[in-house]
Amino acid sequence: MIVVYMTLTGQSRRFVNKLPFESYELSTAFPSKEMTTDFVVVAPTYDYEMTSIIDDFIDYKNNGHFFKGVAGSGNINFADLFVFTARDIAKKYNVPIIAEFEFSGTETDVEKFIKGVESIGNTSFTE
């Protein structure tokens, strides 16, 4: 399983770096990459205009076929808006939310994320 993520502040990158999975960081310089294996997305919580690159990536070629789940990062102080980007993506693409965490996550969040990936199958660790 590959973890695809975007980050504006580095928080998502710090979280992903704690994980035992291969990862790919989305950037505006290289927004399109054709996936040939299952992946999950870590989505920060920002307005759609700032995170639309995630949808562009999922919609690129046959990537949607390999998209298996989404995790959301955010600030719990946003109450109902906490991880709304991940929730919107999950609903749009009919995939499960495998984890929700604040900022760069805790070790407990990492464990929950790993269990979430395991629950959807195909866990390929790159340790």
Image: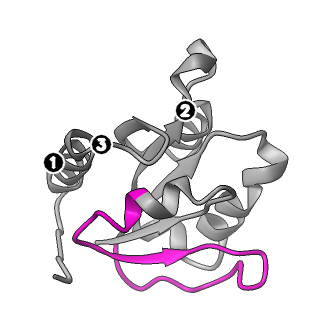
Q: Secondary structure at mark 2?
A: loop
Q: Nearer the viewer, residue 47 or 89?
A: 47
Q: Nearer the viewer, residue 65 or 39?
A: 39
Q: Secondary structure at mark 3?
A: loop
Q: Label 1: which residue?
A: 115
Give above or below for 85 relative to 53. above
Residue 60 horizontal/vertical position (percent): 66, 75
Q: Label 2: which residue?
A: 83
Residue 81 horizontal/vertical position (percent): 63, 21
Whole-number angstrom distance, CA of label 3 to CA of label 1? 14 Å
- Write the start and end of the magenta stretch as one range: 15-38
Give above or below for 90 relative to 81. below
Horizontally, residue 124 falls left or right of residue 10, namely: left
Q: Label 3: which residue?
A: 106
Q: Secondary structure at mark 1?
A: helix
Q: Amino acid at mark 2?
A: Val
Q: Which SS type dominates the magenta stretch?
A: loop
